[in-house]
Image: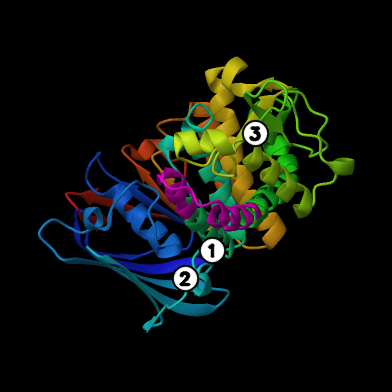
C-alpha cells in the first residue's frame, strides 16, 4: 500500500500543502509547533476518519475557515484510489473516487496505517484506556469490520448508562440492554483474545532481539468482575483462558474459550454488580473496563521493570504490530512515526531503523526535530516544515 500524493487545505495550521510522497521513507523535519504532526494526523484521518488525538471537528479546521479538505491518492495492489475527507464544524464527509461513502464499514481498509508516537512510550504506565486503544487499533487494521462492532457496543453501553442514571429504573428495558451488551461485548473480547494468540509469539521474539534473549515478554488479557465471596472487584487473567491463573482467575467450563463462555462471564458480571451499578449510575463490567497485562520473566512490568525494559517492551509492541499484519495478512501498512527517535536511547533507535530498512516494502512518514536522529540515507525524501508550510529539501 502506498500513499502517492497528499493534498491538504485549511487543516489545523496548514493552509495549503501538497506532498508527492516517496514510496519508502518520507522525513518531515522542523521545530515543534510547525505542523509536522498535523500531516501525520491528516494521513491517519484518511484511514480511520477520526484522529489519534483528542479533538472536536472545529479543532481540525484552520482558524477563520469554515471547512478543511484532505485528499490522498493511494495505490493498493496496483489499483489507484482517490480518498477525500471534508471536515466541517458539524461533521465529516468521506468520499472514495468522488463518490460519497454511505457506510463507513464499506470504506475502512482502504488506507491502513500504524502510528507510533511519544505518547505510546508511556502506554504501559498509563491508564487501561491507552492499552485497550493499542489492541483495538491493531485489530482494526487487520479487520476493518471491528470498528462497526465496537461502535455497536459503545452505543448500547451509552444507552444502558443513561438508563442507570434515570430515577425510574425499567427492568424490562435493562434486560434488553443486558442481552445486547453481553452479545457485543463477548464478540469484542473474543477478537482481542484471538489477536493476542497470534501477537504473543511475535512480541516475544522481537523483544528478545531488542533487549536480551534471556528475557521473555508476555502479554495477557484481564477482565473485571465482582468476586462472589469477598464482593470486591478483582481482575481475572485470561491470558490462556484456562481459568487456572493467579489473581482470582475466572473458572470457565472445561477451559474452553468460545463465545458462549465469554457471554456467560459477562452476564454473571452484570448480575453481580446490578445494585452497585444503579447506585453509581454506570456499567461496571465489560470490555470497556478490561486491561492488558504485561510481564517480563513472569513479573509485572509496571511494578518491576526498569525504564529501559519499559521502552524496549513498547518498541517491541509496535514492531510486533507491523510484523503481525505483514506475516498474517500479507500487507505492509503505512507507518507513521511521530518524533519517537527523541524518546528512544541510541541502541533502540538504531534497532528501529535497522528493522525499517530490512523490511522488503512499506512506506514510512517520520517527523523529527533533528535530522541526525533519523538513521536513514537511502530511499529517503526529506521535507522541512515551518509555520504550516512544507518545503522539499
Looking at the image, the residue that sits furthest to the left is 64
Image-based side of 275 in relation to 58, left or right:
right
Q: Which residues are magenta?
A: 158-182
Taking 33 as reference, is 110 left or right? right
Residue bearing the label numbered 3: 225
Residue at image point 42% right, 49% down: 162
Find residue 184 and report its image quarter: bottom right
The reply, left or right, for residue 379 in relation to residue 211 is left
**Alpha-carbon span between mark 3 and mark 2:** 33 Å
Q: Which residue is mark 2?
A: 104
Q: Which mark is residue 346?
A: none
Placement of 266 over or under 230, stated as above or below: below
Residue 336 visible within the image: no
Residue bearing mark 1: 148
Nearer the N terminus, badge 3 or badge 1? 1
**Percent coordinates x, y for residue 274 in the rendering:** 58, 39
Q: Is residue 117 magenta?
A: no
Residues marked 2 and 1 touching at CB (< 8 Å) = yes
Please determine whether, in this image, residue 161 is positioned above or below residue 8.
Answer: above
| Front: mark 2 or 1 | 1
Residue 168, image x, y percentages: 43, 48
Q: In the image, residue 204 lies at what x, y percent?
A: 72, 35
Amino acid at each position: 500500500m502506498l500513499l502517492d500524493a497528499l493534498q491538504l487545505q485549511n487543516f489545523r495550521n496548514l493552509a495549503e500543502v501538497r506532498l508527492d510522497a516517496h514510496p519508502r521513507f518520507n522525513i518531515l523535519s522542523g521545530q515543534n509547533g510547525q505542523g509536522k504532526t498535523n500531516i501525520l494526523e491528516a494521513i491517519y484521518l484518511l484511514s480511520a476518519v477520526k484522529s489519534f488525538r483528542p479533538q472536536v471537528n472545529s479543532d481540525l479546521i484552520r482558524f477563520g475557515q469554515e471547512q478543511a479538505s484532505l485528499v490522498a491518492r493511494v495505490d493498493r495492489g496496483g489499483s489507484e484510489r482517490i480518498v477525500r475527507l471534508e471536515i466541517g464544524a458539524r461533521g465529516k464527509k468521506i468520499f472514495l473516487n468522488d463518490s460519497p461513502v454511505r457506510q463507513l464499514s464499506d470504506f475502512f481498509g482502504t488506507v491502513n496505517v500504524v502510528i507510533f508516537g511519544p505518547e505510546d512510550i508511556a502506554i504501559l504506565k498509563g491508564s487501561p484506556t491507552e492499552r485497550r486503544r493499542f489492541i483495538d487499533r491493531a485489530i482494526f487494521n487487520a479487520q476493518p469490520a471491528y470498528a462497526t462492532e465496537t461502535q455497536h457496543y459503545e452505543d448500547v453501553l451509552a444507552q444502558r448508562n443513561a438508563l442507570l442514571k434515570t430515577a425510574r429504573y425499567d427492568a424490562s428495558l435493562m434486560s434488553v440492554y443486558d442481552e445486547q451488551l453481553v452479545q457485543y461485548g463477548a464478540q469484542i473480547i473474543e477478537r482481542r483474545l484471538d489477536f493476542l494468540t497470534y501477537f504473543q509469539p511475535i512480541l516475544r521474539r522481537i523483544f528478545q532481539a531488542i533487549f536480551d534473549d534471556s528475557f521473555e515478554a508476555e502479554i495477557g488479557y484481564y477482565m473485571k468482575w465482582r468476586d462472589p465471596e469477598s464482593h470486591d472487584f478483582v481482575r481475572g487473567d485470561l491470558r490462556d483462558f484456562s481459568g487456572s491463573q493467579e489473581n482470582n482467575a475466572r473458572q470457565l467450563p472445561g477451559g474452553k474459550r468460545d463465545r458462549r463462555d465469554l457471554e456467560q462471564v459477562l452476564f454473571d458480571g452484570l448480575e453481580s454488580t446490578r445494585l452497585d451499578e444503579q447506585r453509581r449510575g454506570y456499567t461496571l463490567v465489560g470490555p470497556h473496563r478490561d486491561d492488558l497485562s504485561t510481564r517480563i520473566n513472569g513479573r509485572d512490568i509496571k511494578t518491576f521493570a526498569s525504564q529501559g525494559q519499559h521502552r524496549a517492551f513498547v518498541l517491541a509492541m509496535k514492531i510486533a504490530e507491523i510484523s503481525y499484519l505483514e506475516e498474517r495478512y500479507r500487507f505492509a501498512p503505512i507507518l507513521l512515526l511521530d518524533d519517537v527517535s527523541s524518546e528512544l536511547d541510541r541502541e533502540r533507535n538504531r534497532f528501529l531503523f535497522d528493522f525499517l530498512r530490512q523490511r522488503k516494502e512499506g512506506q514510512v512518514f517520520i517527523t523529527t526535530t533533528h535530522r541526525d536522529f533519523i538513521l536513514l540515507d537511502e530511499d529517503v525524501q526529506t521535507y522541512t516544515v515551518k509555520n504550516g508550510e512544507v518545503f522539499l529539501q
